Image: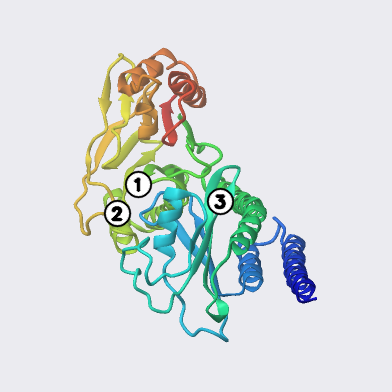
């Protein structure tokens, strides 16, 4: 009888253990299904991470948990802790061990379980002696074999220890969550890129509206201008400013930098130069005041190279100031040319700079080519630059054509020279031809 009773008691214990195991398995399945139900890749990433950590902390009965994601940009700290969950009923402070855990995970890419943190020597850094930490369970977030982050749980409640079952459950949660998290990140990146593309398209449209769509109508002259940005928006600038029926201000500038910042400075330059051209009595004063305004209102690392000229149609005279810009060429009928160099330094670097002007006469058949460095510094796959000589040869070859036709020939030659190599700089041209 005693032996039979002993067997009955052992069977009862085994039955209780099996029931407990089945109950735990059911709870684990419920938690996994609950997590799958409440997260999707169209949710914001932070919300997904919040749900994953909340379910993990509750399911495994930990005091707190964190998720750190591996950032794609290179940095000294490649992981960024995005979500931290604390059970406020059991703990007042937030544990700080994420950097050490992330570094360990990058190296080992497997689960880590420590149930006696005080005596364990896995971590020897400044966080290694945190008295509040008793136990740690950390598993990697792996998506298609790629490490994208890590889930960390701290301190099993009631002074317990993280078990094999806890590690198994957290690993399942991590494996099911990783793909959703990565998809959500890709979705947000794509959404952000679409937004940027829309903003750039709007900026490009605005910039096109700011630039002249046709050359000025000046008796005795054929004038054309164009700008081809290397990016969606450019930093090059050209303008035709009508001062009266016979006089026109003609400008071509190159803003330091690329993209939106350069485009914003370009619009500021245009507004400033136009206002000064219409209110000052000489092109030297116009450039001097423009320089001072840019100096006072732009960052110290921003500057502008600018060529600005005044065309007087009836006199056939062109006065100019070259503020640190590429030297335009004046081609005469005899086959010679001269560089238009007189002026001063670039704009926006120093206040109260001195500038000088020069005057040239324009006779029928003579041509002025004003250009940005995107023309002469265009490179082919062998890193050879287009150069000034090729530019001059094209002008001589097509000097009998209209300004617009010459301009189109130059751009076609530059594009053909560069070939498949991506354009690095804006290409901007203004051509003035006396007819």
Q: Is residue 169 left or right of residue 38?
A: left
On the rendered structure, is 217 left or right of 23? left
Q: Earlier in the sequence, mark 3 or mark 1?
A: 3
Sequence-earlier tag: 2 or 1: 1
- Crowding at label 2, few (<14), some or many (≥20) Cα neighbours within 10 Å? few
Q: Secondary structure at mark 3?
A: helix
Q: Residues within 10 Å of mark 1 (few under 14, many from 20)?
A: some
What residue lies at 40% left-to-right and 62% top-to-bottom?
A: 99
Residue toward you, 246 or 226: 226
Q: Which mark is residue 256?
A: 1
Q: CA distance from mark 2 to mark 3?
A: 23 Å
Image coords of residue 231 (percent x, y): 49, 40
Q: Residues within 10 Å of mark 3 (few under 14, many from 20)?
A: some
Which residue occupies the foreground of this view, 333 or 28?
Answer: 28
Q: How far across and down, in percent of the image, does residue 308 sit?
A: 34, 43
Which mark is on residue 110? Answer: none
Identify the residue at image location x=52%, y=48%. 147
User: In the picture shown, does residue 234 fall above or below 273?
Assistant: above
Q: Which residue is mark 2?
A: 301
| Tag 2 and tag 1, C-beta contact below 8 Å | yes
Identify the mark nearer the N-term, 2 or 3: 3
Between the residue at mark 3 and the residue at mark 1, the CA separation in whole angstroms equals 18 Å
- Secondary element at image label 1: loop
- Residue 205 in the image, given as x and y percentages of width and height: 59, 47
Residue 405 seen anywhere in this rendered image of the structure: yes
Residue under the image location 47 percent in, 61 percent down? 80
Q: Quadrant of residue 60?
A: bottom right
Q: Which mark is residue 203?
A: 3
Q: Give the camera-side residue of 334 and 378.
A: 378
Model colouring: rainbow
Which element type, helix, strand or loop, lies under badge 2?
A: loop
Which residue is outermost to the front?
A: 1
């Amino acid at each position: 009888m005693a032996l039979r009773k002993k067997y009955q008691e052992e069977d009862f214990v085994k039955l209780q253990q099996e029931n407990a195991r089945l109950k735990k398995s059911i709870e684990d399945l419920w938690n996994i299904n609950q997590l799958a139900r409440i997260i999707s890749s169209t949710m914001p990433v932070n919300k997904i991470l919040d749900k994953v950590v909340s379910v993990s902390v509750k399911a495994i009965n930990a005091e707190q948990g964190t998720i750190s994601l591996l950032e794609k940009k290179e940095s000294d700290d490649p992981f960024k802790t995005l979500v931290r969950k604390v059970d406020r009923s059991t703990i007042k402070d937030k544990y700080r061990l994420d950097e050490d855990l992330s570094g360990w995970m990058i190296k080992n890419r497997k689960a880590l379980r420590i149930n006696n943190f005080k005596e364990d020597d896995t971590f020897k850094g400044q966080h290694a002696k945190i008295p509040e930490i008793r136990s740690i369970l950390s598993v990697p977030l792996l998506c298609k074999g790629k490490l994208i982050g890590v889930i960390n749980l701290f301190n099993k409640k009631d002074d317990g220890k993280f078990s094999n079952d806890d590690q198994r459950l957290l690993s399942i949660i991590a494996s099911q969550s990783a793909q959703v998290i990565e998809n959500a990140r890709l979705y947000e990146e794509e959404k952000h890129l679409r937004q940027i593309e829309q903003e750039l398209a709007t900026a490009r449209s605005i910039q096109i509206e700011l630039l002249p769509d046709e050359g000025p109508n000046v008796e005795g002259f054929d004038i054309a201008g164009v700008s081809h940005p290397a990016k969606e928006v450019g930093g090059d600038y050209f303008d035709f400013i009508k001062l009266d029926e016979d006089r026109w201000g003609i400008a071509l500038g190159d803003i330091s930098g690329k993209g939106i910042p350069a485009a914003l400075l370009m619009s500021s330059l245009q507004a400033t130069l136009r206002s000064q051209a219409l209110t000052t009595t000489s092109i030297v004063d116009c450039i001097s005041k423009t320089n001072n305004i840019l100096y006072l209102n732009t960052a110290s690392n921003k500057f502008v190279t600018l060529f600005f000229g005044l065309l007087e149609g009836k006199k056939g005279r062109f006065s100019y100031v070259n503020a640190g810009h590429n030297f335009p060429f004046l081609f005469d009928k005899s086959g010679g040319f001269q560089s238009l160099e007189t002026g001063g330094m670039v704009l926006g670097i120093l206040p109260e700079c001195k500038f000088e002007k020069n005057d040239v006469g324009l006779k029928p058949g003579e041509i002025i080519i004003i250009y940005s460095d995107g023309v002469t510094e265009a490179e082919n796959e062998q890193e050879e630059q287009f150069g000034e000589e090729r530019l001059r040869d094209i002008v001589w070859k097509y000097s009998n054509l209209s300004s617009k036709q010459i301009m189109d020939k130059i751009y076609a030659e530059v594009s053909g020279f560069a070939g498949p190599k991506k354009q690095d700089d804006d290409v901007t041209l203004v051509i003035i031809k006396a007819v």
